[in-house]
Amino acid sequence: MIIPIRCFSCGKPVGHLWEEYAEKTSKGADKKKVLDSLGVERYCCRGLLLGHVELIDLAAEFKKF
């Protein structure tokens, strides 16, 4: 739902990279080049960013009052 602050596998902080990654990829930049420019080298961290899906807006629709 929300991007984790740290990688689940290695513990490297990756949460601060999400906004820049999402902005560049939404403009059509190559995902590999964006991850390389952000300094994300480990497979676990790259997979975390590549596999993340923003679901917070969808989950917010079902909030009970």
Image (tube, rainbow, N blue to C red):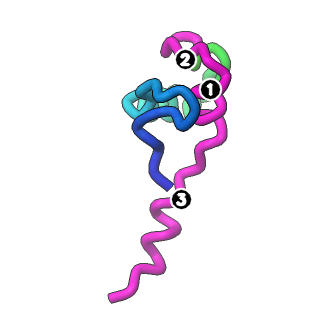
Q: Which mark is residue 46?
A: 1
Q: Secondary structure at mark 3?
A: loop
- Compute the Cα span from label 1 to label 2: 6 Å
Mark 1 or 3: in front is 1
Magenta stretch? 36-65
- What amino acid is found at the position of numbered circle 1 in the picture? Arg
The residue at the far left in this view is: 65
Magenta span includes 7: no
Q: Contact, CB < 8 Å: mark 1 with mark 2?
A: yes
Magenta span includes 51: yes
Q: In this orientation, which residue lies closer to the viewer: 43 or 23? A: 43
Question: Does 29 appear above or below 26?
Answer: above
Question: Does 62 appear above or below 7?
Answer: below
Quadrant of the image occupied by residue 63: bottom left
Residue 8 picture location, percent across and down: 54, 37
- Compute the Cα span from label 1 to label 3: 19 Å
Identify residue for label 2: 40
Q: Residue at x 62, y 26 (%)?
A: 46
Q: Which mark is residue 59?
A: none
Q: Earlier in the sequence, mark 1 or mark 2?
A: 2
Q: Earlier in the sequence, mark 1 or mark 3?
A: 1
Q: Earlier in the sequence, mark 2 or mark 3?
A: 2
Residue 49 picture location, percent across and down: 58, 34
**For mark 3, does the 10 Å Cα neighbourhood hold few (<14), some (14 to 19), or many (20 or more) residues?**
few
Residue 29 picture location, percent across and down: 61, 22
